[in-house]
């Protein structure tokens, strides 16, 4: 397709306002500006953050917006960094200012003026999307389009959280969805033991975790068979923070990886005592993206995906909300 026809329109599944189902509408195809690429979407992963956007839980989000920040597609036009037709990935970080104290200290993930794909700028629940080429990533060839999509956020931000676990030998993962199923494989390849915690009674989820290489799987209310060096929380449930703290060794770390979480209940100071820590992980830097894609080229990560057409975006979000997925949902326009 050439973008020389300004009247050209495309389908997009858009959040018109908070707390309403997405609407599949025809919108003008966006023209790329200087430094931007127009990308034909081949696959776009469905992330829990998209649910928070649909539910109006992110204060920074402006409506209407097209969600979707795990985008795999091919360059149609624009930019100079990639060849026309090249397959690229578009992640959550869409733009940073380059001059605030965070940007100049290697922490662009915390940029004061950062913009995020599918939140501040339209994302990939659409046939086409534009992106600043400086924030796009190359995708390892070994992955198909739909298989690669969950790497762009579930994999990448999961990986940033993983680096916060430092050299943890025994690593707990609370909430075994898209991110955990990628990370369990990475951790296993690193020779670490993964302890997977699912919703209580979710036997299918626990089986899935074991298939992904977990050393042990149980319910989030269970104590692990051995104390953990670190635990990463992917489930947006604040009550899991004190539970995870209690599963830690002295000096252990709880890492909260989600963008939104229900309130954390109060707990006795003794559970934090002995240098246990609670930290959060926010967004990603371009360096995180490059590093993770190099890793994904080396470690054969098997992503488990369920594909939906763009018209079925609400069904995909519903399945994610209800915990009906093993792995990740991916929209294929
Ligand atoms: Zn995400
Ligand atoms: Zn900045």
Image (spheres, helix red, strand yellow):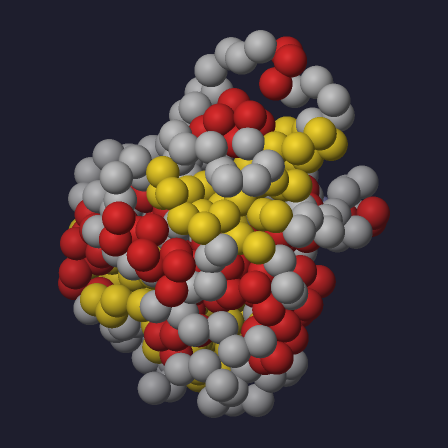
From the viewer's side, name the closer residue of 190 and 6: 190
Residue 205 in percent (x, y) is at 30, 51
Picture coordinates of residue 90 (x, y %)? 50, 66
Left or right relative to 92: residue 329: left
Quadrant of residue 268 in the image? top right
Pick out the residue farthest to the front: 225
Q: Give the total number of marks visible in the rendering.
A: 0
Q: Position of residue 269 (x, y in %)?
A: 64, 11
Q: Nearer the viewer, residue 113 or 87?
A: 87
Query: What residue is shown at x 31% (from left), y 68% (from top)?
Result: 305
- Name the residue at 37% across, 86% down: 2
Determine if residue 138 is in view.
Answer: no
Q: Is residue 15 left or right of residue 241?
A: left
Q: Residue furthest right?
A: 105
Q: Nearer the viewer, residue 159 or 129?
A: 159
For the N terminus, the image quarter is bottom left
Q: Residue at x 68, y 48 (%)?
A: 168
Q: Is residue 205 above or below residue 130?
A: above
Tell me the residue at 49%/55% (across/down).
215
269 with respect to 144 (left or right): right
Q: Is residue 226 visible?
A: yes
Q: Is residue 266 left or right of residue 99?
A: left
Q: In the image, residue 44 lies at what x, y percent?
A: 36, 66
Q: Quadrant of the C terminus?
A: bottom left
């Amino acid at each position: 397709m050439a973008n020389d026809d300004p009247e050209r329109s495309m389908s997009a599944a858009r959040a018109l306002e908070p707390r309403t189902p997405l609407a599949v509408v025809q919108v003008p195809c966006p023209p790329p500006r200087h430094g931007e690429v127009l990308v034909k979407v081949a696959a776009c992963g469905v992330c829990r953050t998209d649910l928070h956007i649909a539910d109006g839980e992110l204060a920074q989000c402006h409506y209407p917006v097209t969600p979707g920040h795990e985008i795999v597609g091919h360059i149609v036009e624009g930019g100079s960094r990639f060849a026309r037709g090249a397959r690229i990935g578009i992640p959550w970080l869409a733009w940073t200012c380059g001059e605030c104290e965070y940007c100049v200290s290697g922490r662009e993930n915390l940029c004061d003026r950062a913009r995020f794909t599918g939140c501040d700028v339209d994302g990939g629940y659409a046939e086409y999307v534009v992106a600043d080429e400086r924030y796009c990533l190359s995708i390892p060839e070994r992955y198909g389009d739909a298989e690669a999509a969950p790497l762009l956020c579930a994999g990448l931000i999961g990986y940033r959280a993983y680096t916060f676990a430092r050299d943890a030998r025994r690593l707990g993962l609370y909430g075994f969805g898209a991110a955990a199923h990628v990370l369990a494989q990475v951790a296993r390849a690193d020779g670490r033991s993964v302890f997977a915690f699912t919703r209580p009674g979710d036997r299918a989820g626990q089986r899935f975790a074991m298939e992904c290489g977990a050393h042990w799987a149980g319910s989030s209310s269970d104590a692990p068979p051995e104390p953990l060096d670190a635990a990463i929380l992917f489930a947006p449930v604040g009550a899991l923070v004190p539970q995870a703290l209690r599963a830690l060794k002295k000096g252990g770390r709880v890492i909260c990886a989600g963008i939104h979480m229900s309130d954390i209940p109060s707990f006795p100071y003794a559970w934090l005592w002995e240098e246990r820590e609670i930290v959060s992980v926010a967004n990603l830097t371009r360096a995180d993206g490059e590093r993770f894609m190099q890793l994904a080229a080396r470690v054969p990560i098997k992503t488990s995906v369920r594909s939906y057409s763009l018209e079925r975006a609400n069904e995909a979000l519903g399945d994610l909300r209800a915990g009906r997925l093993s792995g990740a949902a991916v929209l294929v326009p």
